[in-house]
Image: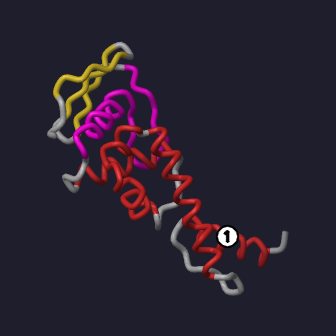
Amino acid sequence: MSPDLARRQAELVAALVAGGPVPAGFDVRRVDAARTALLRKRADEVARRWPLLAAGLGADWLSAFAGWAANRPTQGSLRDGWDLARSLSARGALPALAAEELAAHEARWRYDGRSAPRQRKVPAVGRAGGAVVAQVGGRVRLLRRGIA
């Protein structure tokens, strides 16, 4: 593959999934349509992995996810949902059910926001949006519900 072709392909991928500009010679409307379709597909995948986050946002799910994800390349549905949930939590906008889901993930997994999550082997507590969850021996228990 020529270096020019590789560069143009990388520019197109960046335009489709990471908010990059549409490369010269491509139809802006078609690239925008493809970008929108890919964001919807990505949102659906994250909603399957984070059902309480999606349900908690209800009719605002797609717009909230698309607004957050538009300029971020995917890290996979687990990490995308986790990063979105943490972002909403930091702004005080995380729905109560989603807070419980995030707290459970925080207790079950170790995730620093950069590398792949790793399962915890020792007892841990996860907190998010008022929800508190404990993980002991691989079992996760809700200790306190999030703020409604």
**Residue in front for this viewpoint, 34 or 22:** 34
Q: Is residue 66 above or below residue 104?
A: below
The spot of residue 12 in percent (x, y) is 66, 72
Magenta-span inclusion, residue 123? no
Residue ranking furthest to the top: 137
Residue at 67% x, 82% y is 27
The spot of residue 126 in percent (x, y) is 26, 32
Q: Is residue 109 above or below residue 82?
A: above
Please name the amino acid that badge 1 sits on.
Ala
Q: How is the image coloured?
A: secondary structure
Dot 1: element = helix
Q: Is residue 66 left or right of residue 25?
A: left
The spot of residue 96 in percent (x, y) is 22, 40
The spot of residue 90 in percent (x, y) is 23, 53
Q: Quadrant of residue 100?
A: top left
**How many numbered circles are shown?**
1
Q: Is residue 84 above or below residue 107?
A: below
Residue at 67% x, 86% y is 24
**Residue in front for this viewpoint, 63 or 109:** 63
**Residue in front for this viewpoint, 51 or 131:** 51
Q: Residues within 10 Å of mark 1 (few under 14, many from 20)?
A: few
Residue at 47% x, 38% y is 49
Magenta-span inclusion, residue 106? yes
Which quadrant: the C terminus?
top left
Residue ranking furthest to the front: 59
Q: Which residues are magenta?
A: 95-121
Which quadrant: the N terminus?
bottom right
Residue at 39% x, 25% y is 120
Q: Is residue 34 left or right of residue 95?
A: right
| Residue matched to label 1 | 10
Residue ranking furthest to the bottom: 24
Q: Quadrant of residue 135?
A: top left
